[in-house]
């Protein structure tokens, strides 16, 4: 069994696939199926190895933020590139979320976030999450600084220097 993401567009499946494969590294368009008049009906592509099928289904079925594409980025540059490409014509949201110009919701998060939260004391993890939720595009260094400040506060509270 293979599980893929299926996105239903009114008529912009090809434009969406071209944008997504240009923004997400190691991505490519695999197949375009066309109607008799030549217009693309279905386009299959990979986003960093994840198979996605986009369909031009006509009548608009709206996307909802309750379901989003989740991108984990290795560097701040990766976050900045994805953010710039996906928010062009779209809308920024809180905590690394955005809605692209096609109405698809995304979560653009740093790979380091899990490690920061896992390694942090509960109060530091709460500070990191609070900082994250005040951001739109995530700033990795700001999260690291928040964690470091929490460690300094903990050390000072324990009587250390």
Image (cartoon, grey):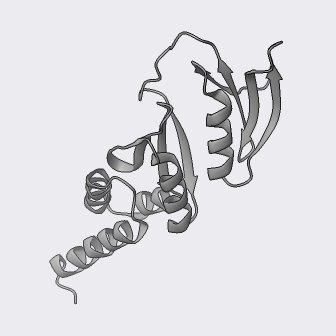
Query: Which residue is drawn at the image coordinates 69% and 55% (left, top)?
Result: 25
Quarter in which the N terminus is drawn: top right
Hey, which quadrant is residue 124 in on the image?
bottom left
* Vertical comparison of 157 with 18: above or below: below
Q: Residue furthest bottom?
A: 161
Residue 127, position in %: x, y? 26, 59
* Vertical comparison of 135 with 20: above or below: below
* Vertical comparison of 27 with 139: above or below: above
Query: Which residue is drawn at the image coordinates 54% and 42% (left, top)?
Result: 70
Query: Which residue is drawn at the image coordinates 56% and 62% (left, top)?
Result: 78
Q: Nearer the viewer, residue 145 or 45?
A: 45
Query: Which residue is drawn at the image coordinates 76% and 30% (left, top)?
Result: 44
Residue 66, position in %: x, y? 42, 26
Left or right of residue 10, residue 51 in this image: right
Quarter in which the C terminus is drawn: bottom left
Left or right of residue 119, residue 49 in this image: right
Residue 122, position in %: x, y? 30, 57
Residue 119, position in %: x, y? 43, 63
């Amino acid at each position: 069994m293979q599980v893929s993401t299926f996105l239903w567009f009114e008529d912009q499946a090809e434009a969406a696939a071209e944008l997504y494969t240009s923004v997400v590294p190691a991505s490519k368009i695999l197949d375009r199926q066309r109607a008799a008049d030549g217009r693309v009906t279905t386009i299959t592509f990979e986003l960093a190895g994840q198979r996605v099928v986009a369909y031009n289904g006509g009548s608009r079925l709206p996307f909802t933020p309750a379901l989003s594409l989740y991108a984990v980025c290795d560097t701040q540059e990766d976050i900045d590139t994805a953010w710039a490409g996906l928010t062009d014509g779209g809308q920024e949201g809180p905590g690394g979320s955005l809605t692209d110009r096609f109405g698809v919701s995304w979560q653009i998060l740093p790979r380091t976030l899990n490690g920061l939260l896992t390694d942090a004391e509960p109060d530091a993890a709460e500070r990191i999450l609070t900082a994250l939720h005040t951001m739109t595009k995530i700033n990795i260094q700001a999260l690291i600084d928040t964690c470091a400040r929490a460690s300094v506060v903990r050390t000072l509270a324990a009587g250390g220097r």
